[in-house]
Amino acid sequence: MPRPTCRICEAPGDARTIVDALLSQKIFLREIAKQTGFSKSSVHRHSRNCYIAGAAKSLQSVRFDPARDRVFVRWPGQPFDEAKLAKNDWIVNVVYEKLEVENPSAPVDEALAEDRARTAAKAELLADPILPENPPN
Ligand SMILES: [Zn+2]
């Protein structure tokens, strides 16, 4: 429910619709403030008090009804026939998280390089043994 003191809800025109659309896109509050001219704290207050209440209210009207609704799972890389969907069908989209691993082969490369260096040093030592300067008599 909009609070009576919310500047965004009270603003004329499409201000609230625009801010809500940006919030739905998960745009940072400071970026929304920059784009719309509202203060970051106004955007924050609106997101906490008005936007969430509106989103929750809209979800209540589209609740899953197990007696009427069906669930389909859309797997990445698998064909999915949207033509067979009915009005009350739900789609669960499976998305694999992409992990940001920095150069995962680095430890293996490092270990192989160290092994090559040790093997080379050992071969060098065997080919040209260091003799003591003053061999014992
Ligand atoms: Zn508001």
Image: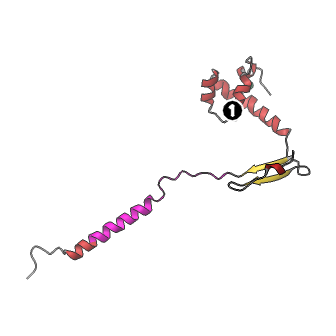
Q: Is residue 23 above or below residue 92?
A: above
Seen from the viewer's position, the closer of residues 101 and 74 is: 74
**In terms of image quadrants, where is residue 51?**
top right
What range is drawn magenta here?
A: 95-121
Give the x, y percent position of residue 60.
84, 39
- Residues 80 and 11: in front is 80
Q: How is the image coloured?
A: secondary structure
Kind of residue at disc 1: Leu
Q: Quadrant of residue 136?
A: bottom left
Q: Quadrant of ligand 1?
A: top right
Q: Secondary structure at mark 1?
A: helix
Q: Residue at x 36, y 64 (%)?
A: 113
The reply, left or right, for residue 66 in relation to residue 96 is right
Q: Residue at x 54, y 50 (%)?
A: 100
Horizontal and vertical percent position of residue 53: 78, 33
Q: What residue is shown with label 1?
A: 23
Quadrant of residue 110 in the image? bottom left
Mark 1 Cα shell of 10 Å, populated few (<14), some (14-19), many (≥20): some
Q: Height in image: 135 above or below 117?
A: below
Q: Quarter holding the C terminus?
A: bottom left
Residue 66 belongs to the span the image colors magenta = no
Q: Is residue 101 left or right of residue 26?
A: left
